[in-house]
Amino acid sequence: MKKAIEIAPDRMIPGGTPDPAIEKHGHVGKPVSRIDGPLKVQGKARFAAEFAAENLSYAALLFSTIAKGRIADLDIAAATAAPGVILVMTYKNAPRMKPMPLFMTDAKAAGGDNLPIMQDDRIHWNGQPIALVLAETQEQADHAKSLISVTYDAEPAITSFESAKAAGTDLAEFQGEPLKLEIGDASKALAEAPFSTDQIYRTPRHAHNAIEPHAATVSWSGDDLIVHDATQAVVHTAWSLAQVFDVDEKQVHVTSPYVGGGFGSKTLWQHQVLGAAAAKLAGRPVRIALSREGVYRTVGGRSQTEQRVAIGAKDNGHFTAILHTGTTVMTRNNAMPEPFIVATRSGYAADTFKLQVEVAYMDMLANTFMRAPGEAVGTFGLECAIDELADRLGIDPIELRLRNEPEKDPTGGAPFSARHIVEAYKSGAARCGWDQRGQPGARRDGEWLVGLGCATATYPYYRMPGGAARITLKRDGHATVAVAAHEMGMGTATTQTIVLAERLGLPLDYVSVEYGDSVLPGLVLAGGSQQTASIGAAVMAAQAKLNTELLKLAGNDSPLAGLRADDVEGADGGLRKRGEPELHESYESILARAQRDEVTVEAEGPTPLELVHWSMHSYGAMFCEVRVNAVTGEIRVSRFLGSFDCGRILNPKTAASQFRGGIIMGLGLALMEETQFDERNGRIMNPSLADYHVPVHMDVPEIDVMWTDIPDPHTPLGARGIGEIGITGVGAAVANAVFNATGKRIRDLPITLDRVMSRLA
């Protein structure tokens, strides 16, 4: 089937005929402020922990302090007797529940792990919830939790990376495929190459730190479960909770109108299940809001990696071999190895490849997706290695990349749907003053060493199956699109307002968007930078269906009589014939003649076969200037430029925000973020923003962003994903700038002061 899709004529593939709306230039491409902005700044946007409920109770979780073993004794007497306590739930009295369906094991599965949740006395990681206190106030619940006394029978646990590797590794799998690819004999080609680099790059664990900690307000109405959640997967969460509590999917209603950031973490974790179990046990609504420590203890993050990157080249810079191999860690109860080779598969042309990820297993909190899983850390190794090779060859780092620019996907062979990274590099280099870069260690401003580095950013274009949309058009020309999508801060409602207004030819204030509710159409995940594409394909299908219905209603007395849906487009508050704008009739006229107040259609997007037919990616050229203090080792990022090639930009205002946000997150990855994991006992030791450092205003320079704005002819409206591309390549750009400033390589993240000083000494 895959081969048949690859060789099929373009016209048989979704996107094979370019979206006609690509040529429209009404609302798309103009800066529009977020329509939810006023609600948020006025405090009128209700988040998960702000939903009111009669007789609401509050939950607090107690976490284990060993990595593996069993609970020997759990004394809850003092907690039960504490003021305001409604109940204390443990494995002894929790309702019987099934494990969560593990994410990626079913189309609708959302679970972060598939462990029993408070069903027995077993401990699987240091931080596992072992008791839930329910009280009349949050303060009473938190206090009572501190009164619980626990003793354990600890068992030997694997809590260090080295011991995990020593216990044996498996070939990692991601999205159902092994993370292994070999083309030719890369090891032989590397050994024979006149120029080469061969180094180990390491990246640490990272914790999720969305500005809104995870929370849910949960209640039961008979056998029906209502969850107001902070989730980026409303339909997935509803289905998965139905499996846990053994009820029909239609009996679970999940809403999530506003989410304060997700980045891959806001799917289904144990706290929602425990909140629902406590609500069932108490017969009262429950609010369960994780503290920041609670997020670190129970919500997974990015796993550490150890990557070998080796590249062989001829004296002209032509790559003869690319080897990108190494190890990451996960648990045996989740399905997310950090796939750090994915960017390498399509980044550069080479004669031979050897790519492979091995996974070792630890007794720890299940890791999960985190913004650009794989690419964020994989580009660090790959792009640093290219910079090292450029230095050995005496070739400019940008020039070396351009000399190895592939004409087609270098490992899969598919043609690129669109690839304009060369234009992004050239325009970015001119804007940032790349020609003033100089040799390593050559630029100095007093005691500050100044350096400039670059790296390629890349992230795949995804469009997951299941996207659906419902369009309702009223006689007065107002339209609503309803889809089970999510608003996590990226401007979903604003973008979809722009898209529907563009397609229907309506003013922006005539369009509204319904989203964030599991009862709405579609199986849409806000992940993989694919939500806009998923909705876009569904809206295209729904508009075609709407046009067909409107033409039927128009009848023979309309100037549009005899036309098909493909012949018309939305414009000026109605339909008109493509290429003959004088053949036009307003929506109001069509519906009035048909004596209809409104028309509603619903449609699904086509199966995303285009992902197999073409190699589809967003790209970026990242430029970073750093200043390194020669006395103290302090690093300051003084300038950053991202030059992006992501197809057509639908809303420049929110797109620039997405790009900058990704870059800032990348600066954290490069310079400070690291989950401190005690390898003696598996405990996270910095579970707060006081100890886990993220970039603040003083760490972030003015960030310049630009883009090619060249439409991809095979995507809805010519756009590709922008949510994750911004973080990729940043770590390498910073590291390469540090090398240019100091002449010293740092191959382990984060690039902290002590690592700089040890290299400068």
Image (cartoon, rainbow, N blue to C red):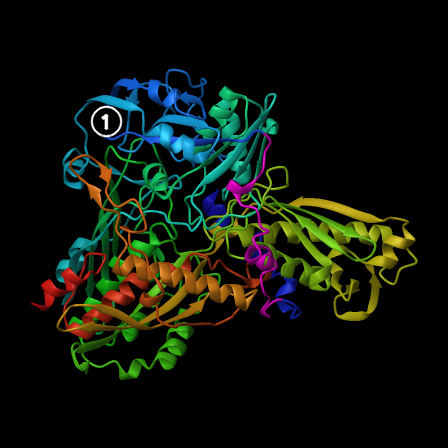
Residue, far bottom: 436
Q: Residues within 10 Å of mark 1 (few under 14, many from 20)?
A: many
What number of labels is visible? 1
- Quadrant in the picture for residue 663: bottom left
Q: Can residue 742 be seen in the rendering of this structure?
A: yes
| Image spot of residue 289 (x, y percent) | 44, 38
Q: Out of 254 and 165, give the one closest to the viewer.
A: 254
Local SS, label 1: loop
Q: Residue at x 49, y 46 (%)?
A: 4
Residue range (magenta): 28-54
Percent position (x, y) of residue 19? 62, 61
Q: Is residue 578 magenta?
A: no
Check if residue 49 falls in the magenta segment: yes
Residue at left offset 56%, top offset 55%: 40
- Reading the image, the residue beneath label 1 is 68
Residue 755 picture location, percent across and down = 15, 60
Q: Is residue 314 visible?
A: no
**Which of these two is toward me, 733 or 159?**
159
Q: In which quadrant is the C terminus drawn?
A: bottom left
The image quadrant of residue 576 is: bottom right
Does residue 119 sit above or below 264 in this rendering? above
Q: Amino acid at mark 1?
A: Lys
